[in-house]
Image (spheres, rainbow, N blue to C red):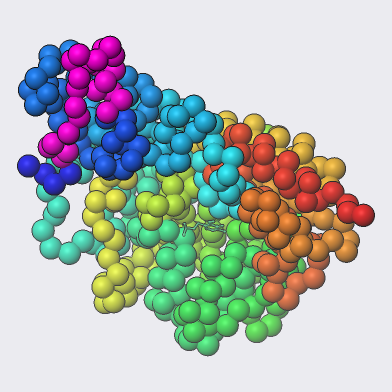
Amino acid sequence: MPRNVAAELPVVLDRAAGAALPQQLADGLRDRVRTGELRPGWRLPSTRDLARQLRVSRAVVQAAYDQLHAEGWLVSRVGAGTYAAEVGTHSGDGRPRGRATSRTPARPPDPGRRISLEPGVPWTEPVPTATWRRAWREVSAATPPPGYPDPAGLPELRAVVAEHLGRVRGIACSPDEVLVTAGTSHGLRLLLGAGFRPGARVGVEDPGYAAAVRCVRAAGMGVLDCPVDADGLVVAALPARRAPAAVYVTPAHQYPSGGRLPAARRQALVDWARRHDVLVVEDDYDGEFRYDVAPLPALAQLDRGNVVYLGTASKTIGPALRVGWLVAEAHVVRTIARHRASIGDLPPWPAQRALVALFRDGHLDHAVKRARRRYAERRRLVCDVLAPYGTVAGSDAGMHVTLLLPEGTDDGAVRRAAAAAGVDVGALSDLRRTSRGPSGLVVGYGSCADTELARGLRVLAEALEPKG
Ligand SMILES: Cc1ncc(COP(=O)(O)O)c(C=O)c1O
């Protein structure tokens, strides 16, 4: 018998007492979950076994289980029994405040919980769809292939990613131009490790993505700070002499300022890269999300030879999966794959196999469509609440906006005031290196619940109110 089955449940039923047996049993079990004697995730005996132990009918046990289900103390897994629910603190009505499951009723968020309005984390609620479960069932039913995995990634996954990118991003590529990664930063690290001289320089937007800067430095390379304006990377400011070996850029939604690089600048960037033999690294981290604006061509659509494209499942399925993709010319993919195999950095099979099924069954398209609708509503709320306090930038795309603050405002002080009130948010000045420019808040609206967003924005507005 597995260790986590509560084989013995010492509930005493008093047949002479006034209370009905199902009620007595429910009270006894509830006490055991509440005190932690029955730990979260422990399986309860079947109704038949418990009825036999307690010498009552199965209907008595079933009625008690049903009541505790409805109250959220117990959860069921289809075909797998009844379990003690994950129980945190107790809400005022005496019901548990635990992680919601398909059987626990949805509860309002804990007012004591921190609210994250930090950028970068998507909305991936609610519980997985049938497609998600089917994908993982397929993984569990399949046998892992013998030997080490293909260092470029599972061939079936590379094929579905190529098809997906052609369909949704207009990037025509073949499976041998796709390499499976563990996300954007990992893709960047693999690329930088596979063919650049240590000491070479990489241009990174300023303000920009701190993880990209860290990846460049970790590869032993230098960082060239590249200026950004309201439209994104200022291509005209890229050096005409002593060009860097590569430039990392976020054209779909400049991180963090939010600009969408206009078509003319995109063309100018790939022309400049070609002239100076520079590799452009296109980070398309939230390119799936844009609102009421026309699509713009990915840089990888304009030029494959000088552009390496980085995509990620972090914003659609979730960052915990750690899967992304890199698109480059086939010989570049082979070089990275060789380098990667030589250092034992191989993509694990289960997540890749599940992702094949998720792509195939339309889970990604579905998730993006739902999230897009949700973000479009949230973005409106964010813009409405924050507009009186500065200039809201970057709301056309992605899942964060940047609130540019009036001159002289210390964004760090606002961030700290909000944090003290339980709301975490990004400060633009933390993402600047040598650039000068307005201070601001980087406000993500992806990860929190709707009610948390409204509350978090109220706290931010309070922190932004002029004092004195
Ligand atoms: C600019 C940028 N790129 C990429 C990512 C995603 O990174 P990963 O794919 O490693 O999860 C993020 C996440 O916040 C980001 O802000």
Quarter of the picture holding the C terminus: bottom right
Magenta segment: 5-28
Of 127 and 243, which appears nearest the observer? 127
**Majority SS type along the magenta span:** loop
Question: Residue at point 67% right, 39% down?
Answer: 455
Locate residue 362: give its quadrant: top left
In this picture, residue 419 sits left or right of residue 54? right
Furthest-bottom residue in this view: 199
Residue extending farthest to the front is 16
Q: Quadrant of the N terminus?
A: top left
Q: In the displayed structure, would residue 255 be above or below residue 62?
A: below
Tell me which residue sits at (23%, 40%) in the image.
Answer: 42
Q: Can you give x and y, in whole percent of width and height, for residue 363 in the image?
A: 38, 35
Residue 454 x/y as whole percent: 67, 36
- Quadrant of the rendered image containing residue 4: top left
Quadrant position of residue 248: bottom right
Q: Nearer the viewer, residue 147 or 426?
A: 426
